[in-house]
Each structure stands twice: as C-alpha cells, then as structure tokens.
C-alpha cells in the first residue's frame, strides 16, 4: 500500500529554475528518503532525513521535514536538463525494515 | 566498491513457467530488500532479509513468490507458475543494517510474462 503521496504528479520547468516537490505520508516514521529514477529502472538514493531533523542539504538539493504535518519537500535549485527524471519519497517506519514509496513526481527540465 | 547487481536485466517467459531472479548486494550490507514496480501498482515492497533473522515476507503477493538469501549475501527471488500480472520490474536493494540506513538499489530485472 502507498504511504507517501507526491505532489505534483508532473512538473515541467526551464533550465535554471528551481523545482519543488512535496510528499505527504500517513503514519509515524523513522526516516524519509528521496530517490530519483531515470527511464523506469534503478533508483538512485538522493538524501535521507531522520524524524528528528527538520532540514537537510546536499549540493543543489534541500529537503525539509515537518512531522507535525506529516510532510516533506524536495527543492532542486538551478535545475539542469540532466535532472529530468521521476522523483520518489519513501518512508521507513519505526518497526518496519522496508520502505513505502509514493507514486512519484515526473520532473521535466527543458533546456 | 561495486553497487547492487541484479541478473538477468531482462527476462521474457511464458505464462506458467517458473523464473529465478538474482541479487548481489553491496558487500558488508546485512539487510536486503526486494521490491517490484509495475504501471498500475507503483513501487511495492515484497520481502526483507536482515542478518540471520527470519525474513519479513509480508509483501509477497501470493504463495507463488518465494525468496532465499544464502550465506547472508546473494538472494534469489523465485516466481512459480508465472502469470501475466507478474510482469514488472523487480528491484533489489541493500542497506548497511537497520531501518535507519539508506537503501541502495540495483538496476532491476524487467520481467515480461507472455
């Protein structure tokens, strides 16, 4: 069953613009992770934020977590055409080992 | 070191046949996960191995699906009597240990049941 819901489902922007994707989830979490997927194959891990953290940065990526609202956002700054991909949030619960994924946001960055 | 590897990368099989999918996790990772991704269902958890503990099989969709992990390393996912609805990309991931760690994914096996 799906835990996270990404918003928007699809996003189209110009190179150089910022892209923001949101994720909401339903139950208490241990951590939340963001992944990128190109061409429907392997997922690339981008960033992990723990339940006691509020914000995390990695290069052009900024992730926020609001546990009171059960939501997270991923910001990609100064986007590039190579950022075109599907982005998924996934949550890990306190008593579970597996990740529960949202349906993803399809990002298209036009050169 | 090397990432998670999976084989084969593509598999086409006839309905009713059995298939085996293989996953080699990152060396030293004690946790191993299988997921599948299909158009209608998104990314679904199948089964999870952690060290020597009994696997968490709660995501397996039917008793035609089974998995084993030998020697705490390589894992094989077996689907018996394949059905067309089993067509999907099967993804394997590994992590260092517990639920607190990042999961690293292999490239997947695309299974097509004709």
Image (spheres, helix red, strand yellow):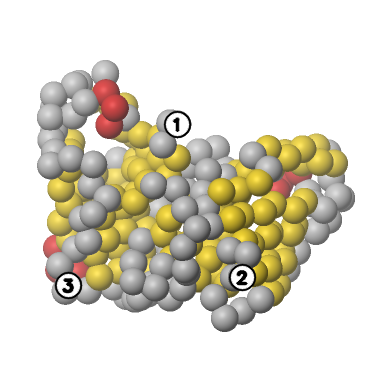
Q: Residue B53 carries which label?
A: 3
The residue that disc 2 covers is: A68
**Disc 2 is attached to a residue of which chain?**
A
* Distance from Cα at disc 3 to Cα at disc 2: 33 Å
Regarding mark 2 in the picture, which secondary structure is present there? loop
Q: Position of residue A19 (x, y in %)?
A: 77, 51
Name the quadrant of the N terminus of chain B.
bottom left
Q: Position of residue B10 (x, y in %)?
A: 34, 34
Residue at 43% x, 31% y is: B40
Determine the image quadrant of residue B75: bottom left
Asked if residue A30 lies left or right of residue A8, the reply is left
Asked if residue B48 lies left or right of residue B36, the reply is left
Q: Which of B31 and A21 is in front in this view?
A: A21
The residue that disc 1 covers is: B39
Regarding mark 3 in the picture, which secondary structure is present there? loop
Tell me, yes or no, if residue A58 can be seen here: no
């Amino acid at each position: 069953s799906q835990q996270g819901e990404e918003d928007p489902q699809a996003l189209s922007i110009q190179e150089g613009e910022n892209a923001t994707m949101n994720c909401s989830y339903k139950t208490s979490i241990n951590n939340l992770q963001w992944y990128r997927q190109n061409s429907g194959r392997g997922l690339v891990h981008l960033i992990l934020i723990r339940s006691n953290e509020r914000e995390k940065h990695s290069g052009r990526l900024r992730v926020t977590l609001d546990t009171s609202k059960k939501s997270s956002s991923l910001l990609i700054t100064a986007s590039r055409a190579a950022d075109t991909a599907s982005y998924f949030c996934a949550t890990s619960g306190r008593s579970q080992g597996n990740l529960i994924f949202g349906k993803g946001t399809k990002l298209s960055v036009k050169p | 070191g090397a990432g998670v590897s999976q084989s084969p990368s593509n598999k086409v099989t006839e309905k009713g046949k059995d298939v085996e999918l293989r996953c080699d996790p990152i060396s030293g990772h004690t946790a191993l996960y299988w997921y599948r991704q299909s158009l209608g269902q998104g990314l679904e958890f199948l089964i999870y191995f952690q060290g020597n503990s009994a696997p968490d099989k709660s995501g397996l969709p039917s008793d035609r699906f089974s998995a084993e992990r030998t020697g705490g390393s390589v894992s094989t996912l077996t689907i018996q009597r394949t059905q067309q609805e089993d067509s999907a990309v099967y993804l394997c991931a590994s992590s260092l240990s517990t639920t607190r760690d990042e999961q690293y994914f292999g490239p997947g096996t695309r299974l097509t049941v004709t």
